């Protein structure tokens, strides 16, 4: 892309200087001048020292947590002193300590998990760190009597928000079950199919970073990420699952939550993050596009959207959910999500009858006999149904664990590249979905399904090794040709060869310039915050009528079905 330089008159030097100082403050903090204390995360140009702590103290502030691993300090500072703090030459950026929320066997069949099990792969030897609402000790995460399993699935637990490490919300336990549940509670005479996780041999390090209402903060999540990095060698942590998110407020380069997940990635941990559940949000007039949440907006991590298995193990009838957040990411315009996986109506482990979600949604306890424990005629006390990208994320985390068991030397970039390269790419062009009396038309484009639908069998059969970074590319709009394109990055593997080129991963017709009847002439991206207010940055039609992934023969007819979302993590319902 061409770079444009704007000349500023010398008479405006003072104003520019003031802007530069103000730009170090996030949008939410820039207008704060009161004397109340504000929790912030201050990023410096280098690792903070005692001198930086004393500077915070001199402004009546208090350092709460040391995040030197991302050159930052978590502190409480009077709002009226933030501008002065931002003016210090060593300060790079200041953001608030934002709130973060928690964003079978049809799931296994849809992603071809049986192929891994047939090869004897179950995740043994791999440890997954789960940063969530905690994990409740349940039967399916305990050793199977008489088996070779030597201990519980949870090898250690840590609390970064207070209140212990148990799951009083009911989200983290469900996530853990999708990855590592061993199916004991559904292995009985009256049970049809044991409800096992995709990698039941995996061990888990449990990080309690979200409270009983599924809420946490940047600091509680970053503290958990830091601890996971520190414990990487101790427990052989190779995968980090983050079924959570919050809105994007600034570039991933400035966002402390994004910087933390990048640090984990650079430490050799595969980071898997939920895309968010805001795909139905049309408040900006974008039909749900541009709603990816942080830290799923970071180009390093694997960001996961949710598919609907439609109640069958055959992926041929699976469709995209309406609530799964879509790209491109706000501000940076990164192509996200990277993959999609089953996330609708997923049955997994129930924390306890007293958990917040279980009490709020008792109808989500499966009523059918094969979810019963033993020969009881009572409703199951072991399983629960949830929907959302939070449920799709651990499916991909489990897949990463299976790949790493097969080849422990794989790097995070190699795992990401292989999962994207081998993803199933045969979709209908659109699906018409009726949910809660509303009709949605979902288009299967790169900003909705990413590189495709997770296929564990294909990923395990692939032997390609990426040699460069697998950062998700940014996208841009060419007003002259009326087309959208990936911005070339010579340091990333997608543009380095035919094997890993963008057409091989996202399809040869990923971006279509023809006017789309779906969008008509409306300015879908025009003046919105997604692309900025300049008309040269916006465009009225993103997708055309030709096939996204190849020839038109790949497209089936438009399908119509329902897409119920029982629980809306991250505020969706």
Image: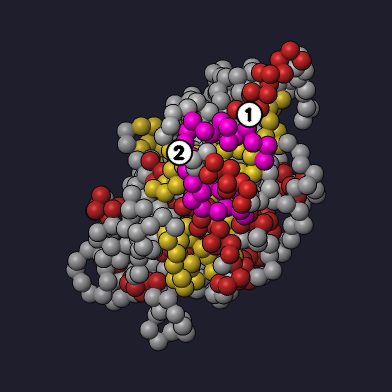
Q: Residue at x 68, y 44 (%)?
A: 45
**In the rendered image, which residue does mark 1 sit on?**
21
Q: Quadrant of the C terminus?
A: top left
Residue 65 shows in this picture: yes
In the rendered structure, the answer to whether residue 552 lies left or right of residue 246 reads: right
Q: Residue at x 68, y 65 (%)?
A: 410
Q: Nearer the viewer, residue 180 or 42?
A: 42
Vertical placement of residue 4 versus 259, above or below: above
The tag earlier along the polypeptide, 1 or 2, is 1
Q: Residue furthest bottom?
A: 146
Helix, strand or loop under label 1? helix
**In the rendered image, which residue does mark 2 sit on?**
38
Instruction: Decide whether residue 503 is among the magenta residues.
Output: no
Vertical placement of residue 432 versus 299, above or below: above
x, y percent for residue 109:
48, 61
x, y percent for residue 127:
54, 69
Q: Which residues are magenta?
A: 62-90
Q: CA distance from mark 1 to mark 2?
A: 19 Å
In the rendered structure, the answer to whether residue 230 lies left or right of residue 151 reads: right
Q: Quadrant of residue 264?
A: bottom right
Q: Nearer the viewer, residue 469 or 12?
A: 12
């Amino acid at each position: 892309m061409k770079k444009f330089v704007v000349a500023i008159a010398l008479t405006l030097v003072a104003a520019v200087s003031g802007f530069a100082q103000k730009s170090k403050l996030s949008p939410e903090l820039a207008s704060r001048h009161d004397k109340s204390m504000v929790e912030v995360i201050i990023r410096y140009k280098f690792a903070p020292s005692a001198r930086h702590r004393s500077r915070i103290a001199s402004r009546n502030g208090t350092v709460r947590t040391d995040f030197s691993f991302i050159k930052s300090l978590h502190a409480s500072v009077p709002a009226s002193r933030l501008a002065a703090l931002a003016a210090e030459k060593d300060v790079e950026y200041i953001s608030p300590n934002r709130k973060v929320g928690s964003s079978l066997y049809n799931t296994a069949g849809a992603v071809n998990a049986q192929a891994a099990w047939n090869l004897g792969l179950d995740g043994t030897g791999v440890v997954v760190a789960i940063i969530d609402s905690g994990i409740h000790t349940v039967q399916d995460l305990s050793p199977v009597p008489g088996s070779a399993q030597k201990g519980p699935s949870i090898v250690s637990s840590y609390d970064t928000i207070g209140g212990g490490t148990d799951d009083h919300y009911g989200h983290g336990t469900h996530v853990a079950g999708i990855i590592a549940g061993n199916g004991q509670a559904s292995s009985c005479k009256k049970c049809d199919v044991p409800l096992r996780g995709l990698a039941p041999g995996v061990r888990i390090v449990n990080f309690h970073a979200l409270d009983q209402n599924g809420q946490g903060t940047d600091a509680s999540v970053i503290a958990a990420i830091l601890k996971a990095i520190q414990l990487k060698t101790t427990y052989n942590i190779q995968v980090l699952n983050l079924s959570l998110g919050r809105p994007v407020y600034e570039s991933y380069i400035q966002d402390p939550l994004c910087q933390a997940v990048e640090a984990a990635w650079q430490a050799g941990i595969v980071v898997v993050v939920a895309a968010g559940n805001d795909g139905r949000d049309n408040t900006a007039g974008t039909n749900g596009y541009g709603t990816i949440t942080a830290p799923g907006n970071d180009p390093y991590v694997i960001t996961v959207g949710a598919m609907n298995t439609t109640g069958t193990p055959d992926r041929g009838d699976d469709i995209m959910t309406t609530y799964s957040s879509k790209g491109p990411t706000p501000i940076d315009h990164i192509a996200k999500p990277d993959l999609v996986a089953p996330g609708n109506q997923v049955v997994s482990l129930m924390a306890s009858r007293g958990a917040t979600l279980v009490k709020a949604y008792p109808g989500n306890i499966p009523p059918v006999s094969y979810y019963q424990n033993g020969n009881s005629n009572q409703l199951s006390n072991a399983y629960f149904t949830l929907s959302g990208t939070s449920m799709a994320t651990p499916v991909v985390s489990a897949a990463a664990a299976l790949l790493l068991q097969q080849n422990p030397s794989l790097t995070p970039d190699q795992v990401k590249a292989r999962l994207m390269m081998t993803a199933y790419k045969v979709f209908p062009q659109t699906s018409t979905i009726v949910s809660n009396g509303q009709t949605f038309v979902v288009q299967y484009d790169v900003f909705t399904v990413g590189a495709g639908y997770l296929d564990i069998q294909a990923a395990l059969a692939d032997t390609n090794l990426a040699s460069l970074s697998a950062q998700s590319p940014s996208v841009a709009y060419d007003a002259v040709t009326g087309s959208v394109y990936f911005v070339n990055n010579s340091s990333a593997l997608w543009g380095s060869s035919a094997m890993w080129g963008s057409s091989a991963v996202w399809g040869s017709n990923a971006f279509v310039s023809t006017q789309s009847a779906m969008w008509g002439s409306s300015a879908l991206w025009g003046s919105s915050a997604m692309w900025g207010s300049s008309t040269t940055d916006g465009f009225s039609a993103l997708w055309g009528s030709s096939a996204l992934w190849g020839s038109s023969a790949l497209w089936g007819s438009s399908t119509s079905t329902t897409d119920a979302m029982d629980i809306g993590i991250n505020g969706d319902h």
